[in-house]
Image: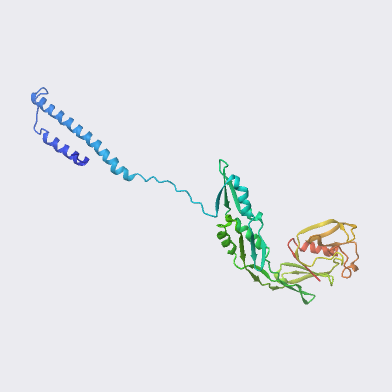
Amino acid sequence: MVLPQPALLAAVTAVRAQVQPRDFRPSSSHSPVFKHHGLRLALITLLVLAVGVAGIVVGGQYWSKHVLAQAQPLVTENPTKPTIAGLNLTVPAAQLDSRVQTITGQPATLTVGTQTVPISPATIKSWLQITTNKTKTQDYIRIKSGAMETSLNQLAGQFVKTPINAVTVPEDGVNRVVVGGRNGTSLTDPNDLKNQADLTAKTVMNGTGLKFSTSLQTQAFQSVTPTAFGKLLVADVSTKKMWAFQDGQQVNSWLISAGKPSTPTPLGQFHVYAKYTVQDMRGFNPDGSPYFQPAVPWVDYFSGGSAVHGVYWHPLSWFGVNNSSHGCVGLPVDEAHWVYDWAPIGTTVIVHA
């Protein structure tokens, strides 16, 4: 029988206590009694050492078998992430081109409200990510995260219109609607196409056709006055007059010369986008002949090549009477200087007839 280590130590201690001479008083180191007891003590020591070594060996085996085995963590293999059917496709390298053609060439449409547009093969291909294994024997086709949602929203964006507010302006005390309002449109559910893209991504690889649709809702326009603008320039090409409003109040007005019938000033709502203190202007007349006007002062561009600027080549009597420009709004030089200093880039310009 092998005793557990604590019991073994207790037993050895008891044996040593029984054989220990309590009243032994040797008179000489050469005494026969001393030799007898010394031999006895040596044998007991050897016995204790042998038992102790055996106990250590057996206890170590027990410890490693029962205790350490329980303490060691279980060894498990990392599971391979499963391939999601439809979102990932593995094809032999020789079949890659034909498989991509099947995927990108499938019929695909997007319907926004009542309008339907095709989804091009190039757009479908932009959704795909293609990688090759190290041996170049297989290719992996995956759907890029977010790619479908992004392109679908871009396609739908052409049907989303910002409403144009109606603008009423007091021109010389008479209220006039200088911008007619127009309702806008927006997607009814901004997350609709994302949800459809997430679901459809699982079937794109099948190449059996794709259909997306989403609805539109009306965004109503509002009716506003010059108080809706910080600074506002309003030009009437019919009456040949222009007004300046700041914080809803009229601060100045002038007679103007706008574009002639063959080169009219564009109508609508614009913003000042570039400014020059002086500029040479050149271009072509409707008959194709060139024109050149040097050193035009105080230029504020608001639409393409059309600008508000100073005119030094006509007398003051010309303004408010004749429209003769190539599309610009002309003012006497001093008045154009005032507009240049007052209207920063971004100032709203409304031109109406």
Q: Position of residue 38 (x, y in %)?
A: 13, 27
Res 128 seen here: yes
Query: On the image, which quarter does residue 178 sit in?
Result: bottom right
Q: Is residue 104 above or below residue 174?
A: above
159 with respect to 146 (left or right): right
Q: Position of residue 113 (x, y in %)?
A: 65, 68
210 with respect to 348 (left or right): left
Q: Position of residue 276 (x, y in %)?
A: 80, 57
Q: Nearer the viewer, residue 122 or 69?
A: 122
**Residue at the spot x=19%, y=41% of the render?**
7
Q: Is residue 9 above or below residue 155?
A: above
**Residue at the spot x=55%, y=60% of the render?**
199
Q: Nearer the viewer, residue 134 or 310?
A: 134
Query: On the image, which quarter does residue 60 sit in?
Result: top left
Q: Nearer the viewer, residue 253 or 281?
A: 281
**Residue at the spot x=56%, y=59% of the render?**
198
Residue furthest to the top in view is: 30
Q: Quadrant of the C terminus?
A: bottom right
